[in-house]
Image: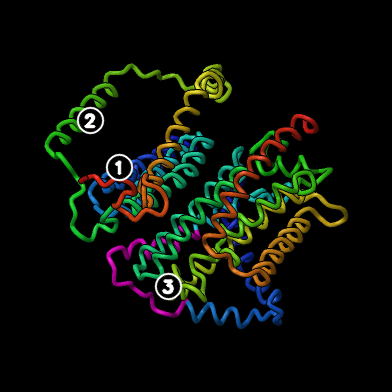
Amino acid sequence: MSDLGIALVFWPTAALMLVTGLYVFITSSMARAGLLLLASLGVEGLIFIALASEFLGFLQLLMMSGEMVIMVFFMVMFMPDPGGLMGMDMTHDKRRSAAVAAAIAVALAVVAVLTDWPARAVGNDAPDVRAIGFEVMGRSMITFLFAAMTILFAMVGGVLLAKAGGRYGIGAPRGEPRGPRSDD
Amino acid sequence: MSDWTPVAVLAVALGGAGAVALLEQLVAGLRPAPAALARDAVATLRQPLRRPETYDTWLFHLAPGLLVIAAVTALATVPWAPGFRGIDFQAGVILFGGALAYVTPAVFMAGWGAGSPLAVVGGFRWLALMLAYAMPVAMVLTAVAAPAGSLRPADIVEVQHAVPMGLVQPLALGLWLPAVVAVCFLPPFDLPHAPSELGGGTFAGYRGLDAALVRLAQRVLLVAVSGMTAALFLSGWHGPLLPPALWMVVKTAGVAALILWAGRRLPRLEIDRALALAWKVANPLAIVAIVIAGGLTLGFYR
């Protein structure tokens, strides 16, 4: 694609990505938040494609759809007000979180502006690309696998704890542990 | 890929959807009636849109459009002939999977946006179903890409010039077919909108253009997955005597007819059984299929 074509795709999609990303935090409906986040990250996939890294773009589109759908499923399942219709406030500790968020945003902006980014364009068969591929698929793979297993165990554990009966076992009515009661 | 490729893909989508509508009548044992189908389509398009009385109406009206985009994108990756491969990307198989992945949020959006109890139930059934059946699709795609050593659909067709992949990897084909039928929300996996259980479910509220787009998207999806089945498992455009494109048309129509016929013959699966089948049988077998594909690749395709 020409530079103009890339610019025409990049700037509107980048704006859309930021706006949908922002709305994720404004809405209080779990379904809407998940779908808006999917829109934001899916549009990011389109930016990858426009910047000619098709594989990354397709993978982003594929993975984000699956992940955000899982997120919507779990959030609606676990949240007391999934539709955002009861006016429940989902934010906590507002002043301190706003301060932390602002500080991180400023820090990232400073890093982005002050870093001496390389201006050299790297082709598909550059040695750097090869090196990154071997790094990701080789030595770093065990880290990724470990992270993936941790997330999987956390998800399975979360579902087990949230099931009726929870950690007290199948068949126990919710909220009433089998065995000795807590007040005696 | 030329400037005319998008036009050609849209033509294949519209023509294919019409052909599927005729095929549905044939499989049902009716005499194909194109004129009646056209009249039905016009009548549907003339209905006014229905606006559900809930908060998320924008999701409700966005869903059919997203469905059509996902279906047409999936169709665009199907290689029809050596000269016409749609949008021919190096990672076309991933784009096919990525496009199918957007059917999931689209149908959920339809159910959630409609806001009626049965529609929301349909939407959640659908999410659970797709979480279970998206994995076999992705794993089978890797299993057929491994022998070709390429994620480009046209390369996978070329590697089958002697033996179709369906004969080499029957397990992968057996896992693929039910999973793609589920992605197309066709019977026996029509759980989100099950006409006789949920009264239309996720799509019950659609009238006019919305309803027409959903029907169009489902038929285009069927063409896309049938075409991809023909390309990935039935050696695509390879075949004696007939020209390559015609072979693809014949194989695609055969797969689509098989899927529609099975949908009429098999009873609808209960959601628990459909999920148990996926998590306890299909997903473990899909891992076996990948191991088999790896062995075949090392032994015969290198």
Image check: B209 left or right of B148? left
- Residues at circles 2 and 1 in contact by the CB criterion of under 8 Å: no
Residue B163 pos. (x, y %): 82, 44
Residue B181's quadrant in the figure?
Answer: bottom right
Along the viewing direction, whichever of B20 and B273 lies nearer the viewer: B273
> Which residue corresponds to mark 1?
A18
Residue A40's quadrant in the figure?
Answer: top left
> Which residue corresponds to mark 3?
B206
Image check: B123 left or right of B300? left
Q: Type of residue at label 2?
A: Ala
Residue A138's quadrant in the figure?
Answer: top right
Determine the secondary structure under disc 3. Answer: loop
Determine the secondary structure under disc 1. Answer: helix
> Which residue corresponds to mark 2?
A105
Q: Chain of mark 2?
A: A
Q: Type of residue at label 3?
A: Tyr
Q: Is B54 covered by the magenta stretch?
A: yes
Q: Residues within 10 Å of mark 2 (few under 14, many from 20)?
A: few
The magenta segment = B45-68
Quarter of the rendering occupied by the C terminus of chain B:
top right
Residue B72 pos. (x, y %): 55, 56
Q: Which residue: 18% across, 30% down? A: A100
Residue A99 pos. (x, y %): 14, 32
- Residue B244 at least partly seen: yes
